[in-house]
Structure formats: structure tokens, C-alpha cells
Amino acid sequence: MPTNEFVEKNSKQPNYPISSVGNALRLLLALKDQRRLRLSDAAREIGVSTSTAHRLLAMMQSFDFVRQEKESKTYMLGPVFLDVGLKAVKNMDIRSLARPILTDLAARLDETVHLAVLEGVNVRYVFSVEGERQLRVADRTGQVLPAHSSAMGRALLSDLPTHRLNEVLQDLTARDHSLDLDSLMEELDRIRNTGYAINARPDDVTSLAMTVQDPDGRTIAAINAAGPSSRMTKQGQKQIARHMHAAAAQIEEALRIGNQA
């Protein structure tokens, strides 16, 4: 959008505008709407020369706000927006929205359930409700684990866009040289096909997890049900998955309503 059109459509201008910051923000808004921009398109959007647009995009790329496709040379939003999106979810307090739903889910399953979000290459447990049985899985709220090591982490990884997944996997393999990348990729494919992830831990605990999406269809969190493997049998996993699908749908509906309020 040329500069004069932008001014007309945005009457609330700051008293002391900084043109370079304004241009960067306008490019981000353009990328949100158009998904991809060529250098010439970017220059035209903000009414500057291609050399100026190139310097601006290079700076934005250095902070991961944009990235450039090698083949097409087009620019698109960068991976930093995944982390920004997750922090926005926290500001919406997804825990408050999910609390009654997960409390009901824990009562239905009589197992411990958790809510978690992806933070870089890790998964953070942000809320849980314990089951009432004498033998149950403990609350893991606040724990941070490598994403590939848990059912919720793998469920979240399976929903990442390809470019973001590749970046996370590269970081994970750099940190854990024993990571079997081929096996992990096969597991992520299985999760995409079945709609949920399963993790059988060495301490005889089995976890079943699936993701939750925001109103725009972006994966923002995961929920799980965890219990002794003797109760989380293959026969019962499909029934557990049905209850969890219903709970995930309820959380997504609560997010949609909250987004409209």
C-alpha cells in the first residue's frame, strides 16, 4: 500500500513517527494478508526504493520476523511469530478457559489430564487436574521437557508448518545427538494420521495427547490424559481419544467465543 493511502486509512498517527519502524510494521501487515512478497512488491507497498526495502527486510530477517524462500526469493513471515502467538495465547489465559473443561475430562476418565504449550524446542506443562484414583499420575504443572520426549510435545511438533518443524528438529538434534530423527518423523506421520500421540514411559505410565487450535486454525496448545499403563490399554485408548476430542473441541469453542467478546 503506498504511503499516502496508508496515512488515509490510519488516522491515529503518533506525534513523533519513526519512518523505518512504520515501514517494518506495514510490511508485516502486508505479509499477514498476502502471505508472500517479492522485493519489488515490498518496495511498492511502502513507497520506497528496492534497495531501501532490501535493507529493511534484511534487518527483519536477522531477527526472524521474516524469512526468504531460497528458490522463489519471496519473503514471508518468520518463525518468531510462532512464539509471539503462543505468548498471545497465554495473555488470553487459556488455562482459565480450559479449566472447567479439563476438570470435567479428568472426572470422566478418572485420570490426570494436562494442558501444555510449545516453547521453542520444549513443551511446558501449564495446567493439570489429577484423577481421583489412589494410583494416579502426579501434577506436572510448570515442568519443561524436550518436545520430542513427550506425547504432548510430539503432538505439537506434528502440527508445525514444515519450515518451522525443520528448524526445531535441527535445534533438537544439535542438543541431543542420540535423537533418532527418522523414527521421530515416522512417529509424527502416525500422529497426523490418527489425530493423537501416545507415549509409553519407562515408569509404566502411558500418555495420550492431542492438539488444540485457535479460531484461525493454528495449533496453540495440547492436552493429554495420563495414567498407569495397565489402565491405558490399547483397547481403551480409542474411547479415551473420543473424550479428549470432545474436550479439545470445547476448548476451541471457548477460544472462539472469547475471541469474539
Image: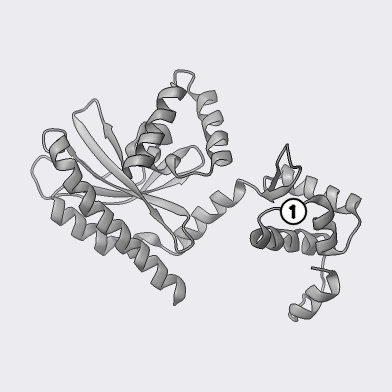
Structure colour scheme: one colour
Q: Which residue appears at 82% of the width and 51% of the height? A: 39
In the rendered image, the quadrant that contains the N terminus is bottom right
Depth check, front residue: 130 or 196: 196
Image quadrant where residue 62 sits: top right
**Which residue is at the front of the view, 239 or 173?**
239
Q: Please state the horizontal and vertical placement of residue 180, each as a whole percent of the image.
A: 43, 21
**Depth check: 32 or 129 in front?**
32
**75 displayed left or right of 244:** right
- Evaluate whether residue 144 shows in this view: no
In the image, is residue 145 above or below residue 105?
above
Above or below, comparing residue 102 to residue 80 in the picture: below
User: What secondary structure is found at the residue carrying circle 1?
Assistant: loop
Q: Could you tell me residue 138's position as x and y percent? A: 21, 42
Q: Is residue 215 left or right of residue 224?
A: right
Q: Position of residue 217 (x, y in %)?
A: 46, 58
Q: Residue at x 52, y 31 (%)?
A: 169
Residue 135 falls in which quadrant of the image?
Answer: top left
Disc 1 target residue: 37
